[in-house]
Image (cartoon, helix red, strand yellow):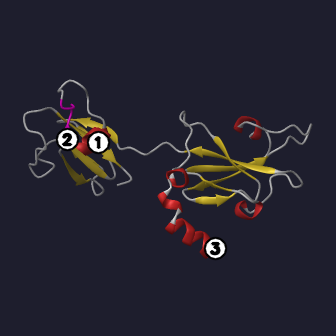
Amino acid sequence: MSQARDHWQNVGYKSSALSATIVDKDNLPFKCASGAMESCMCPGTLWFGLATRPDNGAKIETFEDMREWRTLSAESEDWQSCSVIEFGSDPLPGYDKQCFCEVKAPYEASRCADEGDDCLCNGHVYFSSRFKADKTTPAEFSDVLGMGFTIVDANNTGTVTCTSDTFDGADPSPDTAKQCFCDDKK
């Protein structure tokens, strides 16, 4: 184990082929390992199931076909072995196994109010411009993080009014319409 860790620290993380998370461009589940000798880096749900059909012995190629039979799953953010030991059980003893990774969608805060309206939130509330720099395209949360914003914690109340008064008079973009986003996960 220490040799693997040393290799990763000295060589592996520098290689984009080794350090990049493998994600299907359409964000569909993908096969990431075959059997106990392989492991997966899966940022989501790792599914453990049959590699061949027990009824006719045909190779199982797709996630949907694998899910026709008993499977096990585990939430994952790191490397996991595609093995009975890792999952604690065998979905169907005596058959070869494989793993599929179902990547979870990235979390993003949700828009909760226009300026002047109430925002229901149990987390951080972001107050920012309603539009991008072109002043016509609505700003998404990812845009807000690159623009000026102010933030307040709504944990104690669950509701805040989307105005600069709520944010101690801070106005992240004067003379423009504002909006609020709720980040429940903080």
Q: Residue 129 in magenta?
A: yes
Q: Is residue 61 above or below residue 33?
A: above
Residue 109 visible somewhere in the drawing: yes
Q: Residue furthest right?
A: 56
Numbered disc total:
3
Q: Which residue is mark 3?
A: 1
The x, y position of residue 52, in whole percent, is 84, 43
Separation of disc 3 and disc 1 at Cα? 44 Å
Does dot 3 land on a helix, a strand or a loop? loop
Q: Earlier in the sequence, mark 2 or mark 3?
A: 3
- The quarter of the picture where residue 83 lies is bottom right
The x, y position of residue 62, in whole percent, is 72, 36
Q: Earlier in the sequence, mark 3 or mark 1?
A: 3
Residue appearing at x 61%, y 69% in the figure: 4
Viewer-nearest residue: 164 or 158: 164
Separation of disc 1 and disc 2 at Cα? 8 Å
* Principal secondary structure, stretch drawn in magenta: loop
Crowd band around label 1 with a 10 angstrom C-alpha radius: few (<14), some (14–19), many (20+): many
Q: Which residue is mark 1?
A: 181
Q: Earlier in the sequence, mark 1 or mark 2?
A: 2
Q: Quadrant of the N terminus?
A: bottom right
Q: Quadrant of the C terminus?
A: bottom left
Inspect the image, locate mark 1, and give the three-letter code of the amino acid beneath it: Phe
Crowd band around label 2 with a 10 angstrom C-alpha radius: few (<14), some (14–19), many (20+): many
Please state the extent of the stretch shown in magenta in the rendering.
Answer: 128-133
Viewer-nearest residue: 96 or 129: 96
The x, y position of residue 91, in whole percent, is 80, 52
Q: Which residue is mark 2?
A: 128
Q: Nearer the viewer, mark 3 or mark 1?
A: 3
Viewer-nearest residue: 183 or 97: 97
Residue appearing at x 70%, y 63% in the figure: 86
